[in-house]
Image (cartoon, rainbow, N blue to C red):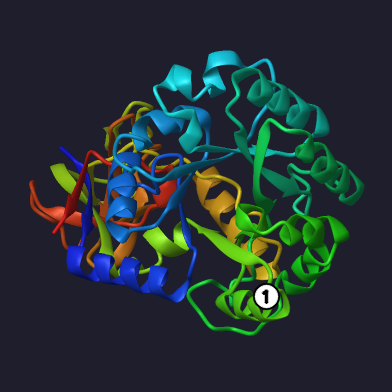
Amino acid sequence: MSLTLHVDGDRWRAHLRDTVAHHPGLVPVTKGNGYGLGLHRLARRAQWLGVDTVAAGTYPELAELHQRFDGSLLVLQPWRPGHGEHQDPAALGVDPDRVVHTVGRLEDLDALADQGRATGRPVRVVLERLTSMLRHGFSGDDLAEAVRRSRRGGLRVEGVALHLPLPSARATLSTRSSRSSHGTEVERLLAEPAVADLASGGGPARQVWVSHLTEAELEVLALKFPDLVLRPRVGTGLWLGDRGALQVTAEVLDAHPVERGDTYGYRGRSAPRRGTLLVVSGGTSHGIGLEAPTGEATLKARAASLARGGLDAAGFVRSPYSVGGKQRLFAEPPHMQVSMLFIPHGAPVPAVGEEIEVRVRYTATSFDAVEIS
């Protein structure tokens, strides 16, 4: 009874090598559920790729990464004083010298500097500049002040970080599209005196840690700012960039013929017409049937949302499971570990034990098994 992620190993590994080769300085992002593959697998694969740094989402994730990857560990979650051992590398069993902290407030920078001076071991930090994302980071004036304060000792500044919104659908890292996404904003931020001030010192402070830029934008920036070292942080485009190498299947656990009006399920629903109830692996504990807001703003996307809402109100919701080449409807909301599908009379019914395809959001799905050939 399993929801399984199958990976064409040769194809996937070729994509990973190609992506790293085309993006010098690439930093694999290893966070959350490991993009469905698991943090431990991503850490081992990053080691195999030969990169010098991986990015973790939060401090607790370091515990699963540091034993499988021996390079630097950049934490994307901003460091905050007062969180104690929850963000203390030593308390997590990690060598503090391997960890690069992200800082976006002056008071946090001062606290880390005090820590570094007290221990005699400079703390490695990246200074995050606030972007149009408006999530974390220094304003322009505060970044200039942060650069000045960083020279008082206790810190080893490893450059500036820019976390940007997602690019347009046509402008992705895996394409060479010249369609503008964030290039103008990044050029403006990199032209600030504080960035030039950092870069003038050479060494690791010349690094710019960026996310969600297209390949074309990275090439333009490299030409316009030759004194800076671009470090693209890439997660989805690396691990999930070749979807053809990935397939998700669920096992058929049971099949029950029903007539119109037959009662079934937890909620005592009635069959709308003659057909088959198919019980398959995968439920809410896996992430099946749980949907995060997409934020789509187009008329087409809004119409699709309204259509789904109408289906839901009528008791018919399209599932991510495909049978006979069509996505089938949930017979009722997914259970914790299994789901029930309605297969109309006349449509092919897979046998118990057979595997059927499932479309999932990898970052929100927990698989029972990951099989890499």
Q: In the orientation shown, which residue stands out farthest toward the right?
A: 141
Q: Is residue 318 among the parts visible in the rendering? A: no
**How many marks on residues?**
1
In the displayed structure, would residue 309 be above or below residue 270? below
Q: Is residue 72 among the parts visible in the rendering? A: yes
Which residue appears at 67% of the width and 59% of the height? 202
Residue 129 x, y percent position in the rendering: 76, 50
Q: Quadrant of the C terminus?
A: bottom left
Mark 1 highlights which residue?
Answer: 226
Residue 155 or residue 329, whichever sits in front: 155
Residue 117 x, y percent position in the rendering: 68, 23
Residue 52 or residue 182, whichever sits in front: 52
- Residue 66 image-quadrant placement: top left
Give the amino acid at mark 1. Answer: Pro
Residue 334 or residue 222, whichever sits in front: 222
Residue 262 x, y percent position in the rendering: 27, 37
Which residue appears at 67% of the width and 75% of the height? 226
Which residue appears at 31% of the width and 51% of the height? 47
